[in-house]
Amino acid sequence: MTHDIWHIGARLAPSLALPGATQASDRRRERHMQEPGVPIAYTLRSDDSDTDRLLSELAWHLESRGLRICGTVQANIQRAHDCRCDVDLRVLPEGPVIRISQDLGAGAVGCRLDPGALETAVGIVEDRLSRGADMLIVNRFGKQEAEGRGFRSAIAEALAHDIPVLVGMTPLNLAAFQEFTGGLAEALPPDIAELEDWALTHLADEMH
């Protein structure tokens, strides 16, 4: 089922304070307790590979705490003698790894995304969401999502069930993402401590 995020009206219970909080973390928790809302955030960095590494590390940290993390993280595999790379998605938590790029041949131009492979990953993620998850991580809100496909429905479905969502973002699709979320998504710095703190703030109840 597909929902528009601004029609969801998701609400969270107040989170519990976590040790070692920074002032920014304290402010975030205070806002969360006083103004519960849609639990969605994004992180943006000009270098996509840095975002991919951050989200992979975050998923590992949260999984090591026993949390059920659903979604995808991306790995780019550099080819020998080719400036382009193969793009693989690892479906959380246990796989599979799905190649979503196509080899269009030497000198080819245009989008290398394999839409069928991407939709295969989407289907697996949505199935796992339906069986229960604590958080959804989406490696990228890309062109497919901006045009109404890809992980767009999975994001909305997670929020419909009050499952926090964290999305990797690029400047190119930020406007489409903000329109999709109705401006409700929180911008997070590309810092592993900040991302983990945001996640744990929204997942505090699941950890007790």
Image (cartoon, grey):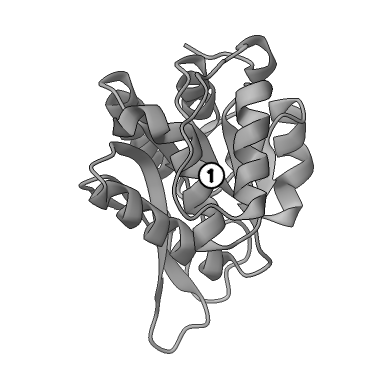
Q: Which residue is mark 1?
A: 198
Residue occupying the far bottom of the picture: 81
Q: Is residue 151 left or right of residue 173?
A: left
Q: Is residue 84 left or right of residue 136?
A: right
Q: Is residue 205 left or right of residue 3?
A: left
Residue closest to the eye, 152 or 198: 198
Number of marks drawn: 1
Q: Amino acid at mark 1?
A: Trp
What residue appears at the point 33 percent right and 40 percent down from the top-left corner? Answer: 69
| Image quarter in which the C terminus is found | top left
Residue closest to the eye, 25 or 115: 25
Residue 98, relative to residue 16: is it above or below?
below
Quick one: SS at disc 1?
helix
Measuring from the top left, give residue 56's x and y in whole percent. 39, 59
- Residue 90 appears anywhere in the view: yes
What residue appears at the point 48 percent right and 55 percent down from the top-left corner? Answer: 20
- Residue 123 appears anywhere in the view: no
Residue 85, relative to residue 62: is it above or below?
below
Measuring from the top left, give residue 145's x and y in whole percent. 60, 36
Counting other residues with Cα less than 10 Å from the Cα at mark 1, is it few (<14), some (14-19), or many (20 or more)? Answer: many
Measuring from the top left, give residue 25's x and y in whole percent. 60, 48
What residue appears at the point 62 percent right and 29 percent down from the top-left corner? Answer: 32
Measuring from the top left, give residue 184's x and y in whole percent. 72, 29
What residue appears at the point 39 percent right and 61 percent down from the top-left corner? Answer: 57
